[in-house]
């Protein structure tokens, strides 16, 4: 039996402590790099998820806005479908009123040949205004009311001391509104406060004698 150690055992070398430390450091650095890469990947995924969520919420909000706008337009189309037609009929109402106002004095007397005609015009006007009311059209006759630029158009202003400033003292032409939408402003004359009188200049002379020193 040979006393020499086995050849394979002879070739096996025990790693030096320095080599083991180097290997451990390399393994640690590799694990740290992998963890860092994984952390970055998670952070990127979270960022992408947040961005996707934000875009989704924006898309949902925009869709809701479009839906509401479509509903509003549908409601407006239904409520104000007669706007153009109503504006055309305003001239008819104006002409009926002018016809009655231009009738000669005494036209409604029993013996007047125009009595039946005037009565027919009045009935026609009432029927037209009644039809306006049924469709949400309201006549504006703001005599004595406060001027409102949303519904009235001032044709002129007149200084009046005994009338509240901004009050309507005359209506040239009535206005009309369709529900809450203005069809035509009322054309009016508005009272305004008179300008304050200028204080008289102090008299410098009296009876031709200069009082100044």
Image (cartoon, rainbow, N blue to C red):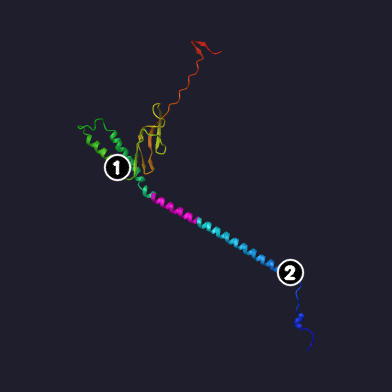
Q: Nearer the viewer, residue 48 or 191?
A: 48
Q: Position of residue 101 (x, y in %)?
A: 29, 33
Q: Secondary structure at mark 2?
A: helix
Quarter of the rendering containing residue 24: bottom right
Whether 169 is drawn above or below 61: the answer is above
Residue displayed at 59% across by 61% down:
44
Q: Which residues are magenta?
A: 58-75
Residue 59 falls within the magenta-colored stretch = yes
| Furthest-right residue in this view | 3
Quarter of the rendering containing residue 179: top left
Whether 191 is drawn above or below 125: the answer is above
Residue displayed at 71% across by 68% down:
26
Image quadrant in which the C terminus is located: top right
Residue displayed at 29% across by 42% down:
130
Q: Nearer the viewer, residue 33 or 120?
A: 33
Q: Nearer the viewer, residue 129 or 31?
A: 31
How crowded pointer 1 is (Cα within 10 Å; few <14, some 14-19, many 20+) is rated as some
The mark lying in front, picked from 2 and 1, is 2
Q: Position of residue 105 (x, y in %)?
A: 26, 30
| Furthest-bottom residue in this view | 1
Residue 204 falls within the magenta-colored stretch = no
Image quadrant in which the N terminus is located: bottom right
| Furthest-left residue in this view | 111
For label 2, the residue is: 21
For label 1, the residue is: 130
Q: Position of residue 82 (x, y in %)?
A: 35, 46
**Which numbered disc flags the more N-terminal residue, 2 or 1?**
2
- Assign the magenta stretch its main secondary structure: helix
Quarter of the rendering containing residue 94: top left
């Amino acid at each position: 039996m040979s006393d020499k150690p086995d050849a394979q055992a002879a070739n096996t070398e025990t790693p030096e402590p320095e080599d083991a430390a180097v290997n451990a450091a390399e393994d640690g650095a590799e694990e740290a790099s992998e963890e860092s890469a994984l952390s970055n990947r998670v952070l990127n995924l979270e960022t992408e998820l947040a961005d996707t969520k934000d875009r989704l919420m924006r898309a949902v909000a925009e869709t809701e806005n479009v839906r509401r706008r479509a509903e509003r337009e549908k409601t407006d189309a239904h409520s104000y479908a007669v706007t153009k037609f109503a504006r055309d009929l305003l001239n008819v109402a104006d002409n009926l009123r002018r016809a009655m106002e231009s009738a000669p004095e005494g036209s409604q007397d029993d013996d007047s040949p125009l009595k039946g005609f005037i009565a027919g015009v009045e009935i026609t006007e009432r029927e037209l205004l009644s039809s306006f009311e049924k469709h949400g059209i309201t006549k504006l006759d703001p005599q004595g009311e406060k001027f409102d630029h949303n519904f009235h158009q001032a044709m002129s202003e007149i200084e009046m001391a005994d009338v509240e400033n901004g009050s309507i003292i005359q209506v040239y032409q009535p206005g009309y509104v369709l529900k809450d939408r203005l069809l035509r402003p009322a054309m009016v004359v508005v009272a305004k406060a008179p300008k304050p009188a200028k204080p008289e200049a102090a008299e410098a002379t009296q009876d031709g004698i200069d009082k100044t020193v």
